[in-house]
C-alpha cells in the first residue's frame, strides 16, 4: 500500500498533537524537568525548599532534677571551669559551637574575658566577625551557595569540625529562624538558608549524621515529616533513626555516644509529634534499652565508662588502655543523653550518680587551662550535669552568681 | 495433502513464460497430475523457508538450553512478583534497605510482570522459552528483511551469524533488554521496507508505547527514527541541492512525523515525562562505571574483537560495493559504533545495522565481481517470472515440521509435551547461589548482610523474605557512598573491616570467584565459616557487633 505525502495541514495537526501531549505530561509532573536536570548532573530545580513553619526551635527539656547526682556547689564548680574564656584571636569554631550549645544564645557573663552567647552567635553567623578573628587569608567559615549557606567543615582548626554541628549548635542555642547570617560578600541571609542548605546537602550514608538528625528533628516537625534531598532521595525520620542505630554501636562521633543523644532526642520529639512509624519506634525502644543495659554492665567501679562501653561487661572485664579524656568523653556524653531519656531507658539511678561523682572529681582535679585544652569534652560534662538538675547552664549560673553576690553582700 | 516432488532446482529449470509460471513447474512424472500441489496459494512457501526455519530453529534450541543467568533476571522477577502481589509499582527501591527512600522509576515493569507471570504459570523453562523466542524473533525479522533485499539465503544466514556474533555478550543473558532489542529490530526492519505502509502510522506509535513499558532502551529507537529522517533529508539535499525539496520530500516528512508520534507515544507509561529523565539518569549513573557491562569497548573483550573484525569487513565491502551508501546507513553505523566505544552495552544495537550493511554490500560486491563460487548465491531470478511459481506446500509442511521439532526439543517443549521439566539446578547458571539461598532460608541471618552484587538478586528472589541484602545488580539505585563502600570491601582495600562494622554486617555471603575477600574472611579470627558449597560461602561473625541485633522492619 502506497502512502501519500503528508500535507502541511496534517503536519501542523501532528505538531499540535505532539506538543499538547508533552504539555499535558509536563502539567501532570512539573518536577519531571527538575529530575531531568538532576539526571544531567545539574542542581537546577532539583531541590525544593523544605517547608519550615516554626520561627523558634522546639526545646527538648531535661526530665530529672536530682541533687544526689550533682549538688549546686559541685555544679557551680564545674560550670565555672567550662565558661568560654577563649582568646578572641584564632577562635576555633568547634570550641565556640560547643560553648554556645552549652550556654545558649542569651548567656551573659560579668567577666569580659568570657564570650557572651551573643558574641558566639555573631562569630559563627557573621563572616566579618570570623574574619576579624582569623584574618583575611583564612578561607571563610560560611560559604555562599545558590540555594543557601554552607559551612566549611573538616580537620582544619579554623573550620567547624563536624558536618552540621554548627547548625545543630545554633539550633540548640535557640536562635531564631530569621536570625541574620552573613556569608562573605555581605549578602545577608538568614538562619533558614543555613537550614535549607543542610537539608539539600544531607546524605543518609555520610559518616556523621548525628547533628543533621538533631537539627532536622528540632526544626521540621510537626508539619514536615518527610522531604527530598538534592539527590531526590526521600528522607524521613524513620530513615534517620535507622541510620543512627546502624552498625557497631561503638562507632560514631565520641565513641558512639552522640548517636544515642540524637536518638533519644528523636524519641522525645516522636512522643510529641509522632514522627516515627510503629516499627521503627519499636526498634528504637529496643535499641535504647539495650544501650541502657550495656552502659549499666560496662560501668567501672569508680563510675566512669571507657570508649568501648558498647561491649557491655566485656569492656569492664578487659579494660582498654586509653587516656583519661576518652573516659571523660564517654561518661559526660552518656549522662547527657540519659538526662533527656525517659525512665524506660534509665539504668539504676546509682549508675548515674556514680558517673556524675567521677566527672565532678575529675573536673575538680583539672586546672582551668587543662579544661580549656579539652574544652569540647568538658563542655558536655558541664551541660550533662546541669541537665540532671533540670535546668540550663546559663540559667543556673546566673542564679548562682546572684546568690553568691547576695551571700557576699554589697 | 498432496505435493509435487520433482527434485528439480527451480532456479535452473524456471518456467519459460508467465503462463507456465502460473501453472507451476511441470513434471515428467506420469503421476504428476495426481501429485499436483492443490493447497491454496497462501499455504505455499519458497524452498528457502525450511532452511531459515532450520537455521533459526537450531539457534532457538541452542538458546533454550542456555542456563538462566544468575544476575539481574532474578531481580526483575522479584520486582514483577512485588508488582503483582501489591497491584502497583513501588515508589521507592523495595529490596535494598541501604537504598531506602531512593526513588524507583521502573523502566521495565511490563517485562518484569510478564516474566514473573510466565514463570509462575509454567516454571523457569518458560523463561528459557521466552529468552530463546525473543532471539528467534529478532533472527526471523532480520532474515525476512535480508532475504527480501538480496534473495540470497547464504548471505542472509551469514548476516544472522554476524548479528549473533557481534551481539553475543548481550544475547547470552536473559533480561528485559531483549524485549527492547526485539522492538529495535522490528522498527529497523519496518524502516527498511522498500515501500512505506499506511499501517506504519499505527504500528510505530504502538511499538513505542509498548517499548517504553518493556525496557528503558526506547531512546535508541527514537534515535533510529530520527537518524532515518535526517539521513533521508541529507540524501535528498545532496541529490537536489535544495532545502525546499527536502521539506517537500514525502519520506522525510513521513519519518519526521513518525519520530514525533513515537516520542509522544512513549509518554504512555506510568511515569509519563519522567521516564525520559530517568533513562538518562540511569545511563549517567557513576556506579555503573564499575560494572563490566558498561565499560567502554576494548579489544580485550571478545565482542570488541568481533566488532573490529566486522567493522573492517564492512569498510572493505563498502569500498568495493557498487551500492550507494545512504546517509542514514553511514550515520547509524558511525553513531551507534561510537556509542558502543563509549559503552560496550550499545554494541547490541549496532549489531543488526552492521549485519544489514554486511548482507547488502556483500551481496552487491559478489554480484559485481561475479566470483564463480558465489555466483549461484547471488543469481537473480529470471525476469518476468512469477515468484509464486517457486512456492510449494511441501516447504511449508517441512518448515512447520522443523519448527515443531525445534520446539519439542527444548526444555519448555519437553515440559509441555511430557508434563515434566528439568530440575531448577539444570536450568540456571552454575553461579546461581541455590544452596546458599536455601541455607539462608533455614538460617535467616540477623541484621544487615554483605553480599556480592551479582548474587543479590537471587538472594532477594529465593532467600528468606525481607533479607537485607547489601546491593543487587540494580547498581544505579544504590546510594553513591554505599556503592563506594561496597567496592572498597570487594577489593579489600584498607579499612574494609571497619566498613563492615559501620554497616553492622554480621553475615557475609560471598562467591568463590571473588577470591580476595574470601581468603581474608577465611584467615580472619573474627569470622566463622558456617556454610559452603561449590558456588559460595556464608561467613558469620563469631561475636556479633554491639548494637546490631535489632533492625527496623
Image (cartoon, coloured by chain):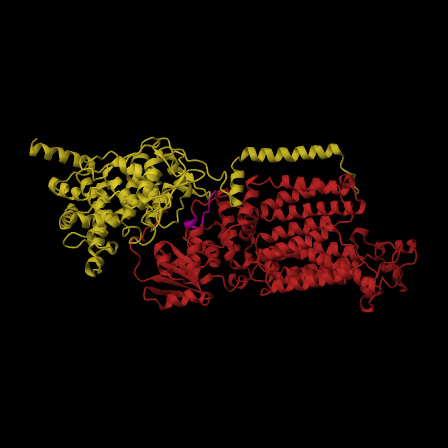
Chain colours: A yellow, B red
Q: Position of residue A264 (x, y in %)?
A: 27, 43
Could you tell me which quadrant the N terminus of chain B lies in?
Answer: bottom right
* x 36%, y 68%: residue: B523
Most frequent secondary structure within the magenta stretch: loop
Camera-nearest residue between B99 and A58: A58
Q: Is residue A55 above or below residue A253?
A: above
Q: Position of residue B89 (x, y in %)?
A: 50, 43
Camera-nearest residue between B75 and A168: A168
Is residue B134 in view? Answer: no
Camera-nearest residue between A39 and B50: A39
Camera-nearest residue between A377 and B426: A377
Name the image quarter holding residue B483. Answer: bottom left
Is residue B389 in view? Answer: yes
The reply, left or right, for residue A277 in relation to residue B60 is left
* x 54%, y 34%: residue: A28
For the image shown, how many numbered marks are present on the structure? Answer: 0
The reply, left or right, for residue B214 in relation to residue A161 is right
Q: Position of residue B491 (x, y in %)?
A: 43, 62
Q: Is residue B302 above or below residue B205?
A: below
The reply, left or right, for residue A4 in relation to residue B354 is right
Q: Is residue A206 above or below residue A3?
A: below
Name the image quarter holding residue B418. Answer: bottom right
Q: Position of residue A339 (x, y in %)?
A: 21, 42
The reply, left or right, for residue A71 in relation to residue B547 is left
Q: Which residues are magenta?
A: B91-99
Is residue A147 located in the magenta-colored stretch of the structure? no
Amino acid at each position: 500500500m502506497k502512502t501519500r505525502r503528508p500535507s502541511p495541514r496534517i503536519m501542523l495537526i501532528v505538531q499540535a498533537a505532539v506538543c499538547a501531549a508533552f504539555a499535558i505530561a509536563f502539567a501532570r509532573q512539573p518536577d519531571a524537568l527538575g529530575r531531568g536536570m538532576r539526571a544531567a548532573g545539574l542542581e537546577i530545580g532539583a531541590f525544593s525548599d523544605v517547608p519550615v513553619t516554626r520561627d523558634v526551635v522546639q526545646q527538648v527539656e531535661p526530665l530529672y532534677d536530682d541533687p544526689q547526682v550533682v549538688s549546686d556547689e559541685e555544679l557551680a564548680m564545674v560550670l565555672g571551669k567550662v565558661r568560654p574564656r577563649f582568646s578572641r584571636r584564632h577562635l576555633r569554631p568547634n570550641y565556640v559551637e560547643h560553648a554556645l550549645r552549652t550556654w545558649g544564645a542569651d548567656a551573659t557573663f560579668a567577666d569580659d574575658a568570657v564570650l557572651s552567647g551573643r558574641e558566639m552567635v555573631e562569630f559563627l553567623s557573621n563572616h566579618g566577625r570570623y574574619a576579624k578573628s582569623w584574618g583575611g587569608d583564612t578561607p571563610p567559615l560560611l560559604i555562599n551557595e545558590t540555594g543557601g549557606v554552607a559551612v566549611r567543615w573538616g580537620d582544619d582548626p579554623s573550620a567547624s569540625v563536624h558536618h552540621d554541628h554548627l547548625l545543630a549548635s545554633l539550633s540548640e542555642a535557640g536562635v531564631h529562624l530569621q536570625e541574620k547570617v552573613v556569608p562573605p560578600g555581605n549578602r545577608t541571609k538568614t538562619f533558614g538558608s543555613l537550614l535549607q542548605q543542610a537539608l539539600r546537602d544531607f546524605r543518609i550514608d555520610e559518616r556523621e549524621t548525628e547533628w543533621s538528625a538533631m537539627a532536622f528533628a528540632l526544626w521540621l516537625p510537626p508539619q514536615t515529616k518527610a522531604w527530598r534531598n538534592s539527590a531526590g532521595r526521600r528522607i524521613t525520620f524513620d530513615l534517620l533513626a535507622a541510620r543512627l542505630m546502624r552498625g557497631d554501636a561503638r562507632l560514631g562521633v565520641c565513641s558512639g555516644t552522640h548517636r544515642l543523644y540524637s536518638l533519644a532526642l528523636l524519641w522525645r520529639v516522636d512522643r510529641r509529634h509522632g514522627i516515627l512509624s510503629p516499627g521503627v519506634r519499636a526498634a528504637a525502644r529496643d535499641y535504647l534499652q539495650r544501650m541502657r543495659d550495656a552502659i549499666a554492665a560496662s560501668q567501672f567501679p569508680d563510675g566512669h565508662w571507657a570508649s568501648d562501653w558498647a561491649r557491655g561487661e566485656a569492656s569492664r572485664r578487659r579494660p582498654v588502655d586509653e587516656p583519661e579524656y576518652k573516659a571523660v568523653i564517654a561518661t559526660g556524653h552518656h549522662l547527657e543523653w540519659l538526662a533527656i531519656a525517659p525512665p524506660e531507658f534509665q539504668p539504676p539511678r546509682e549508675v548515674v550518680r556514680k558517673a556524675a561523682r567521677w566527672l565532678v572529681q575529675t573536673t575538680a582535679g583539672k586546672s582551668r587551662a587543662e579544661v580549656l585544652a579539652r574544652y569540647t569534652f568538658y563542655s558536655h560534662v558541664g551541660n550533662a550535669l546541669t541537665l540532671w538538675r533540670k535546668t540550663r547552664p546559663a540559667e543556673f549560673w546566673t542564679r548562682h552568681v546572684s546568690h553568691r553576690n547576695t551571700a557576699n553582700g554589697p | 495433502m498432496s505435493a509435487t516432488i520433482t527434485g528439480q532446482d527451480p532456479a535452473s529449470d524456471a518456467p519459460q513464460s508467465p503462463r507456465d509460471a502460473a501453472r507451476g513447474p511441470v513434471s515428467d512424472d506420469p503421476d504428476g497430475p495426481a501429485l499436483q500441489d492443490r493447497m491454496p496459494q497462501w499455504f505455499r512457501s519458497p524452498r528457502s523457508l525450511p532452511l531459515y526455519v532450520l537455521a533459526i530453529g537450531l539457534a532457538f534450541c541452542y538458546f533454550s538450553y542456555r542456563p538462566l543467568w544468575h544476575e539481574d533476571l532474578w531481580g526483575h522477577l522479584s520486582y514483577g512478583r512485588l508488582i503483582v502481589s501489591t497491584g502497583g509499582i513501588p515508589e521507592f527501591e523495595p529490596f535494598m534497605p541501604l537504598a531506602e527512600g531512593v526513588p524507583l522509576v521502573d523502566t521495565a515493569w511490563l517485562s518484569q510482570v510478564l516474566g514473573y507471570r510466565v514463570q509462575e504459570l509454567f516454571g523457569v523453562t518458560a523463561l528459557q522459552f521466552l529468552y530463546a523466542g525473543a532471539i528467534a524473533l529478532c533472527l526471523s525479522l532480520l532474515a525476512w528483511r535480508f532475504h527480501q533485499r538480496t534473495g540470497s539465503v547464504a548471505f542472509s544466514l551469514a548476516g544472522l551469524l554476524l548479528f549473533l556474533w557481534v551481539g553475543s555478550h548481550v544475547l547470552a543473558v536473559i533480561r528485559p533488554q531483549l524485549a527492547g532489542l526485539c522492538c529495535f529490530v522490528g522498527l529497523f526492519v519496518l524502516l527498511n521496507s522498500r515501500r512505506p505502509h499506511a499501517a506504519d502510522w499505527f504500528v510505530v506509535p504502538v511499538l513505542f508505547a509498548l517499548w517504553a513499558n518493556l525496557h528503558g532502551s526506547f531512546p535508541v529507537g527514537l534515535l533510529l527514527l530520527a537518524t532515518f529522517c535526517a539521513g533521508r533529508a541529507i540524501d535528498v539535499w545532496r541529490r537536489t541541492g535544495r532545502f525546499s525539496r527536502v521539506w517537500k520530500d514525502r519520506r522525510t516528512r513521513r519519518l519526521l512525523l513518525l519520530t514525533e508520534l513515537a516520542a509522544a507515544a512513549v509518554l504512555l507509561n506510568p511515569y509519563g515525562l519522567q521516564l525520559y529523565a530517568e533513562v538518562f539518569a540511569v545511563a549517567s549513573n557513576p556506579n555503573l562505571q564499575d560494572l563490566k557491562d558498561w565499560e567502554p569497548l576494548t579489544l580485550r573483550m571478545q565482542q570488541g574483537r568481533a566488532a573490529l573484525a566486522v567493522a573492517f569487513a564492512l569498510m572493505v565491502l563498502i569500498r568495493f560495493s557498487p551500492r550507494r551508501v545512504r546517509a542514514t546507513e553511514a550515520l547509524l553505523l558511525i553513531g551507534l559504533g561510537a556509542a558502543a566505544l563509549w559503552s560496550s552495552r550499545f554494541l547490541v544495537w549496532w549489531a543488526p545495522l552492521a549485519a544489514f550493511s554486511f548482507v547488502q554490500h556483500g551481496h552487491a560486491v559478489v554480484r559485481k565481481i561475479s566470483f564463480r563460487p558465489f555466483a549461484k548465491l547471488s543469481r537473480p531470478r529470471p525476469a518476468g517470472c512469477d515468484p509464486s511459481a517457486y512456492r510449494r506446500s511441501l516447504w511449508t509442511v517441512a518448515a512447520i515440521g522443523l519448527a515443531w521439532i525445534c520446539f519439542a526439543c527444548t526444555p519448555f517443549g519437553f515440559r509441555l509435551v511430557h508434563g515434566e521439566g528439568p530440575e531448577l539446578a539444570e536450568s540456571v547458571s552454575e553461579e546461581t547461589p541455590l544452596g546458599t539461598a536455601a541455607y539462608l532460608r533455614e538460617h535467616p541471618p540477623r541484621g544487615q548482610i554483605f553480599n556480592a552484587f551479582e548474587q543479590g538478586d537471587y538472594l532477594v528472589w529465593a532467600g528468606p523474605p525481607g533479607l537485607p541484602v547489601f546491593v543487587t545488580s540494580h547498581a544505579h539505585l544504590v546510594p553513591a557512598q554505599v556503592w563506594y563502600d561496597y567496592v572498597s570491601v570487594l577489593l579489600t582495600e584498607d579499612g574494609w573491616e571497619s566498613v563492615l562494622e559501620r554497616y553492622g554486617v554480621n553475615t557475609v555471603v560471598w562467591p568463590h570467584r571473588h577470591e580476595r575477600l574470601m581468603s581474608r574472611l577465611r584467615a580472619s579470627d573474627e569470622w566463622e565459616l558456617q556454610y559452603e558449597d561449590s558456588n559460595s560461602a556464608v561467613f558469620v561473625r563469631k561475636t556479633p557487633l554491639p548494637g546490631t541485633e535489632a533492625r527496623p522492619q
